[in-house]
Each structure stands twice: as C-alpha cells, then as structure tokens.
Amino acid sequence: RVSRRWLGLWMWGKRDDGSLRPASVAFFLPYLAVVWAVWLVRHLWWLPRRGEHPYNRVAPGVIVGRWPLRYPSEWPEGCTRVVDLTAEFPARRAVTRGRTYRCLASMDCDMPPTAPMVALAMEVAAWEGDVYVHCANGHGRSASLAAMVMVLRGQAPGWRAAFEQMRRARPLVHLQPPQEAILDGVEAELLAAARLRGVAVGEKRVDVEDDGTAAPSGGGGGGG
C-alpha cells in the first residue's frame, strides 16, 4: 500500500510545480494514452450528459472539480489558489501561473500518504478566498481533501457530514475504501485541530443551492 501511494511522487515523476518528468511520461505513455483517452470521452460526452459541471462550490471558499481542461471558460472567476491531487495529469501553466499552487500527487482511487495530506488540509483551511481542489474527475481524491478542510473550518461536524453536504452540490462525489480508511483514521485529529483553531465544530451549517453556490446559513447545527 505504501509503495503504491508513492508511485505518483517517484515512479510517475510529478514535480512540485505540477510538471511530469519527460522520462516518466515516455515510460508510461501506453498507459497514459489510454487513461487520457478514456478521461476525454468521460468528460466531453458521458458526464455532461448526466448533467455534471466541471466544478462546483461545495462550501464557502471550497470549490471541487476535475482537471481543468478548458481554461479560462471552465475556471471559477477570481480563484487564485489551486490544489492538485493528480499523479497522471500535468498541471497546466495557464492555470498555475500567478496563483498559489500545491501538488500532492496520488493515484486514482487512492490517497496520498496520511501525514502530508493532513498537513496540506491544515494549510488550505487557513487560506482565505476561494481554493480550487481538483483530482482527475473531481469525485474522490479532491472531495476527500475538501472534506478535511470543511471539518477543520467547522463547516461540517465530520467527514461524512461534509460528504453529504458536497453531494447536494456535486452528486457524483464518492469514496473508495482506501480513502474512507484514511478519513476515518484522521477525523479525530482534524476535529481536535479545529478546536485548537477556535472553530465551533458542527455549529455552522451551509446551504448549497442547486447551481453549486453555497452560503452560510444562520440556523443551528449539522448538515445532512
């Protein structure tokens, strides 16, 4: 399991700036060509027919989406912070230029190692303004980090509540077993960190509209 989680950082050769090492691309090209082709069919034909948008605002300041294909037409206006969780896609220079960019590469259906994942979530939770959190599809890896951030900010009383909230804005978000296991394992740590930051965990509810916009609600606890 540990070796697989480090594939994106070592064998796949994704750098901190989001670029892929040419030698790694050449070695994995037969596999990458299939991955990229399937991804294009999925996101240019199948998912649009199901009504999914490239990205959705799942909580105030938190936008979850797929790898940004069409830029700038499919980019949230004014968003200057990007978190990239893909190992299999290079970052686009047009997207990262002039923006705060963080890359924590991992494989599809998996998660990065736990310690750097939690550290990144804590960093993002302290940011102000919008952050675009993306993986390949905007369903698993990105939603997992977004759930951590929402817990740290007191926008959800736990990661499961955060996911339920996200599904109202982005219905196809879902978790794989390794992702669930990591979130279960770090939830207590996230809640403790939120309390240390002075956040009233679970007392802030967010209403997410059908179009993916979100606004804090004045009511009492817990999303559903």
Image: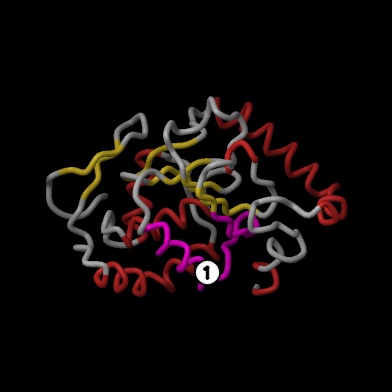
**Residue 118: image location, x then y, percent:** 45, 68
Reply yes or no: does residue 95 show up in magenta.
Answer: no
Q: Is residue 56 above or below residue 23?
A: above
Q: Is residue 124 above or below residue 65?
A: below
Q: Is residue 54 above or below residue 202?
A: above
Quadrant in the picture for the N terminus = bottom right
Q: How many marks?
A: 1
> Which residue, given by chain and number where applicable, does mark 1 sit on?
116
Q: Quadrant of residue 210?
A: top left
Q: Quadrant of residue 189?
A: bottom left
Specify whether 143 is left or right of 137.
left
Specify whether 69 is left or right of 197.
right
> Measuring 22% from the left and 60% from the top, which residue is drawn there?
202
**Residue 211: image location, x then y, percent:** 36, 29
Q: Looking at the image, which is closer to me, 223 or 22? A: 22
Q: Which residues are magenta?
A: 102-125
Q: Quadrant of residue 63?
A: top left
**Residue 221: image location, x then y, percent:** 16, 55
Specify whether 192 is left or right of 198.
right
